[in-house]
Amino acid sequence: TFSQQSSHWWQELDSAREHVNAGRLSEAQSLLRAFLAWAPDHAEAHYLLGVTLHCTGGSSHQALREYETALQYGFDEFWVRYQMGSLHLQRGDTVKAEEQLRRALELNPDHPGATALLKNV
């Protein structure tokens, strides 16, 4: 039934979150891709998929697209900007990194990680 299918997918998302939190990013990635096939407009799932791509050295372009999609669907702007700034810095694009990190700090001026990353730009 639909409610059983729905329950299954929400459990998959919970499992993906647990994998991300435990650093099992490859396992999370496959769960998130499957979940997004079921719920393509889920902001958090796009954000988490971006994180897994970013942190495993996957496609940085795809990670940025996932972050942008998460933002479009309403995920917390601070975290998206923070991760995008980090990824741009990792790629050596200091102009975009600074732009994203400054926006993140406008949203959360006391975040030590964003402040530290901006000092590396």
Image (spheres, rainbow, N blue to C red):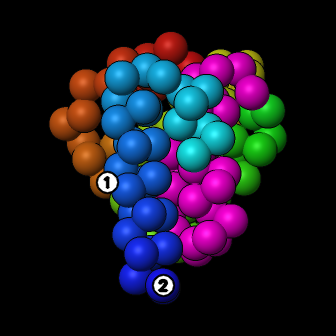
Which of 105/46 is in front?
46
Asked if the residue at tag 1 contacts the one at tag 2, i.e. Cβ–Cβ closer than 8 Å, the answer is no
Position of the C terminus, as image quadrant, is: top right
**What is the chief secondary structure element of the magenta stretch?**
helix
Picture mark count = 2
For this view, does 30 lie left or right of residue 108?
Answer: right
Q: Nearer the viewer, mark 2 or mark 1?
A: 2
Is residue 41 depicted above or below 105 in this figure? below
- Residue 13 numbered tag: none
Mark 2 and mark 1: Cα distance apart in space: 42 Å
Assign a secondary structure to mark 2: loop
Is 24 a magenta residue? no
Per the rendered image, the range of residues in magenta is 32-58
Residue 75 image point, x, y percent:
43, 63
Is 56 a magenta residue? yes
Q: Name the residue under label 2.
A: 1
Q: Name the residue under label 1.
A: 107
Which of 106/39 is in front?
39
Asked if residue 35 can be seen in this view, the reply is yes
| Quarter residue 107 falls in | bottom left
For this view, does 65 lie left or right of residue 120?
Answer: right
| Quarter residue 3 falls in | bottom left
For this view, does 70 lie left or right of residue 54?
Answer: left
Q: Residues within 10 Å of mark 2 (few under 14, many from 20)?
A: few
Which of 93/51 is in front?
51
Q: What amino acid does circle 1 point to?
A: Leu
Is residue 61 depicted above or below 113 in this figure? below
Q: Residue at position x 26%, y 47% from top?
A: 108
Q: What amino acid does circle 2 point to?
A: Thr
